[in-house]
Amino acid sequence: MFRPDLVLIGFGNVARRFLRLLDERAEELRRDHSLEPRVVAIATARHGVARDVRGLDIARALDLVERGGSLASLDTTPDDNGPSSAPVAGVDVIRQAACAAGSTRPLVVVETTVLDVAAGQPAIDHVRAALSEGAHVITANKGPVAFAYAELEALARAAGRRFLFEGAVMDGIPIFNLVRETLPAVHISGFSGVVNSTTNFIITAMEGGQAFAEALAEMQAAGIAEADASLDVDGWDAAAKAAALANVLLGATITPREVDRTGIGRLTAEIVQEAVARGRRVKLVARGKRREAGVSVRVGVEEVPADHLFATLVGQQNALVLETDLLGEFSVVQLGGGLTQTAYALVADLVALARRG
């Protein structure tokens, strides 16, 4: 039985849905996957910190945060300098948990802080600290993979730990695990995809006559759009995903800042409707290609023919096409995405850890 202690760094919508999925599927995870986790620490930017080496009361933690309260009442390890409602760095919480962890229970850090497109911080520091302290890491944050994959993967190997990030691209649809676990000896030479749900929803809505701002507001209300909507609209989210794909699948060492990027901010309903009238569809497409001079990566608005796979994607649907040497091109299509799917990626990564023991 794999009984890890979980440290949650970030406790937003994805992390809270992750915990609810663990509760909803607890019996199945225990029976079929020999997985029985407990949460020993939660660190948030807005709601303080809760730590308990015996395991936190998750129902109370969820209730406190969703009512806008502080986690301080659940904390059994107050800091010397003040109560747990005062800011405590995620790195410190990780180190404290590592010191308190029992030798019989592996430590897993679950990193779900907000994407930072400037440098991928503080998520990268959280991952570094976790691996350095002997913890496994699972994350839905694109930042560490997009900015520092090679370094962090090397650190994980040296520590004999795993750094897993299935939720970084296409929610819970397996991309990285698909390649890692099921494509031995296959070389990937490139990829193309529609990988941002918010922009695809906006474009589809404008084809039907809805205003750009109205469609964006709908995505924000649903919790699908990034907290900073410009990350979606200006193509930064897609650029971060493209950088992550290039770093992991093509061996690149780039950051989102190095991706040739154009967002959808200048699109209007008239532009996308005129393309439809000509038998084409407008899409925000991410592309990466291995070339003799290195790996090229770009994100930009493209018109695709009406019979192209990408043209069939409506609303929040996504697709990724992989170019390979032995299998040619093949695609993975996501017909529905959202909060549950992203949270499920964390569950899937946790199960992957359980399978490795």
Image (cartoon, rainbow, N blue to C red):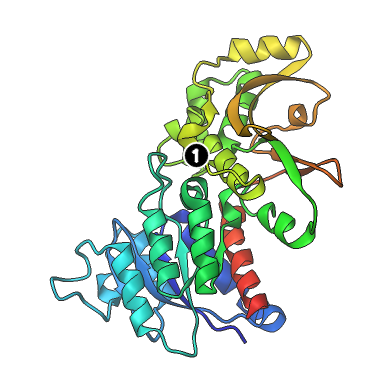
Q: Quadrant of residue 264?
A: top right
Task: Say what amino acid the circle numbered 1 marks.
Answer: Ala
221 up-or-down from 159: above or below: above
x and y percent of residue 98 in the render? Answer: 38, 78
Characterize the local packing of mark 1: few (<14), some (14-19) or many (20 or more) Cα atoms within 10 angstroms.
many
Above or below for 236 versus 74: above
Residue at the farthest right position? 327
Q: Image check: 299 left or right of 152?
A: right
> Residue 51 sits in which quadrant?
bottom left
In the image, 293 versus 213, the foreground residue is 293
The image quadrant where one finds the N terminus is bottom right
Name the outermost residue toward the front: 292
Residue 65 % position (x, y):
35, 62
Residue 54 figure quarter:
bottom left
Could you say where residue 184 lies in the image, as x and y percent from the top left? 79, 59
| Horizontal relation, residue 231 to residue 73: left or right | right
Query: Badge 1 is on which residue?
Result: 225
Q: Nearer the viewer, residue 63 or 97?
A: 97
Question: Element type at marker 1?
Answer: loop
Query: Taking 133 as reference, is 116 above or below it?
Result: above
Tally the marks.
1
From where the camera sits, is residue 62 visible? no
